[in-house]
Image (cartoon, rainbow, N blue to C red):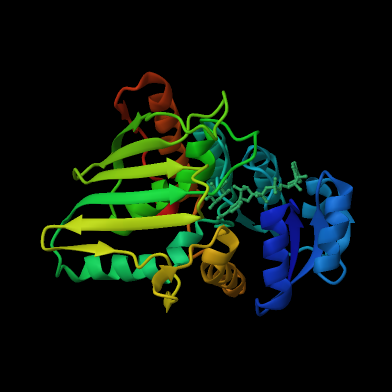
């Protein structure tokens, strides 16, 4: 049994604790930590009892914790990642790995130096059936080369502390990872276009935004990020290829005919839409623990996403096309 310690007991942390407690085979939550003690206590209750910490480092060094789930806000990830590497403990870290490419580089260097693959990153869309069907279809070659991708990433609303750069670090970071993984290509450059701002936004947030990414082979990707769309948690993706277009089946709910109307529900909640993908990523992380391997998104993937995110944030301010420049991929991650 893998004894898991969870750092960060907010919405996502509690959702992961519930899945490990109720649905994941081979793991249990033995410790929880949150800077807000009441939050940790509530989370321990979901786990059916667990040690409670308010300091992530103490949890990491608890001998009853074999592996650590980092689910604190992105800005807090770096310190706990470095501490877990020092302790030689296996980590599942929610996205983003860190909020800057420099911090990701520190974590990457530390993991390489440790000589062990310890970190899996929470890009759960790689475990989603619909995206895997698209990836597999592209790989058959039947549709020719991918040329264009259209994505939408819409949230019903966000808190008042959510600002313009978070549209990149917190939200479109999913598409940054997903799109290059789908077509197996790296990014060359990015740009951001700012449409008229919705009346539901505030002075620190430009919403919606259109983010454009060009891959090294020339595939052009547009992502509409609209985090106060009001109507639902609406995620769409279409890959336009030379000999066909592959569009993910969304909304992922039945089409209902009733009272002379045809309708399809759109959920408002990412925990509902991606439940199976979250379950699959955590089960995979647990299953790989015995073999000491990481099959899911790695520290390198987190670094690549952060470099691209940094370029997009620069592009939000400059309005220009910004280059995506990474270091050489270390042998360790090949
Ligand atoms: N993969 C996905 O689709 C999603 C991923 N996330 C990710 O999960 C992480 C947490 O997000 P939410 O739960 O939505 O945030 P949240 O704001 O609901 O919860 C964060 C929790 O962390 C605690 N916290 C703050 N600093 C901490 C520290 N240094 N150590 C321990 N706890 C600390 C807060 O008290 C709070 O309880 C973020 O990295 C976020 O990007 C969140 C939602 C969906
Ligand atoms: O990861 C997520 C949240 O952290 C983020 O705040 C949302 O914008 C995303 O839609 C969701 O998938």
| Residue at the spot 49% in from the left edge and 47% down from the top edge | 302
Q: 49 or 105, which lies in front? A: 49
Q: Position of residue 259 (x, y in %)?
A: 44, 76
Q: 299 or 41, which lies in front? A: 41
The quarter of the image holding the N terminus is: bottom right
Residue that extends furthest to the front in the rendered view of this protein: 260
Q: Is residue 39 left or right of residue 305?
A: right
Q: Is residue 102 left or right of residue 239?
A: right
Residue that extends furthest to the bottom in the rendered view of this protein: 25
| Residue at the spot 74% in from the left edge and 73% down from the top edge | 21
The quarter of the image holding the C terminus is: bottom left
Question: Is residue 155 among the parts visible in the rendering?
Answer: yes
| Residue at the spot 81% in from the left edge and 58% down from the top edge | 32
Q: Position of residue 80 (x, y in %)?
A: 70, 45
Question: Is residue 327 among the parts visible in the rendering?
Answer: no
User: Disc count in the image?
Assistant: 0
| Residue at the spot 66% in from the left edge and 43% down from the top edge | 73
Q: Position of residue 139 (x, y in %)?
A: 23, 67
Q: Is residue 51 left or right of residue 276?
A: right
């Amino acid at each position: 049994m893998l004894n898991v310690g969870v750092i960060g007991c907010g919405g996502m942390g509690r959702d992961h604790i519930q899945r490990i407690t109720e649905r994941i085979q081979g793991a249990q939550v033995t410790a929880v930590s949150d800077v807000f003690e009441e939050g940790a206590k509530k989370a321990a209750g979901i786990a059916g009892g667990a040690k409670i910490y308010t300091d992530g480092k103490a949890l990491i060094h608890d001998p009853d914790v074999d592996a650590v789930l980092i689910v604190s806000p992105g800005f807090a990830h770096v310190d706990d990642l470095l501490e877990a590497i020092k302790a030689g403990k296996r980590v599942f870290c929610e996205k983003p790995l860190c909020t800057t490419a420099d911090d990701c580089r520190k974590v990457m260097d530390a993991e390489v130096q440790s000589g062990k693959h310890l970190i899996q990153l929470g890009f759960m869309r790689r475990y989603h059936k619909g995206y895997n069907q698209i990836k597999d279809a592209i790989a058959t070659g039947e549709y020719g080369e991918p040329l264009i991708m259209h994505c939408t990433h819409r949230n019903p609303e966000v808190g008042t502390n959510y600002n313009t750069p978070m549209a990149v670090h917190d939200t479109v970071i999913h598409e940054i990872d997903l799109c290059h993984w789908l077509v197996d290509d790296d990014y060359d450059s990015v740009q951001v276009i700012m449409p008229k701002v919705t009346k539901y936004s505030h002075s620190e947030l430009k919403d919606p935004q259109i983010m454009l990414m060009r891959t090294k082979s020339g595939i052009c990707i547009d992502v509409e990020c609209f985090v106060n769309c009001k109507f639902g948690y609406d995620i769409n993706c279409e890959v336009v290829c030379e000999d066909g277009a592959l569009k993910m089946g969304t909304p992922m709910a039945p089409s209902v005919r009733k009272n002379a109307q045809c309708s399809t529900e759109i959920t408002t909640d990412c925990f509902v839409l991606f439940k199976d993908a979250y379950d699959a990523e955590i089960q995979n992380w647990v299953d790989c623990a015995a073999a000491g391997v990481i099959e899911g998104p790695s520290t390198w993937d987190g670094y690549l996403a952060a470099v691209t995110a940094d370029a997009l944030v620069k592009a939000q301010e400059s309005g220009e096309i910004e280059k995506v420049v990474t270091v050489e991929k270390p042998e360790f991650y090949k």
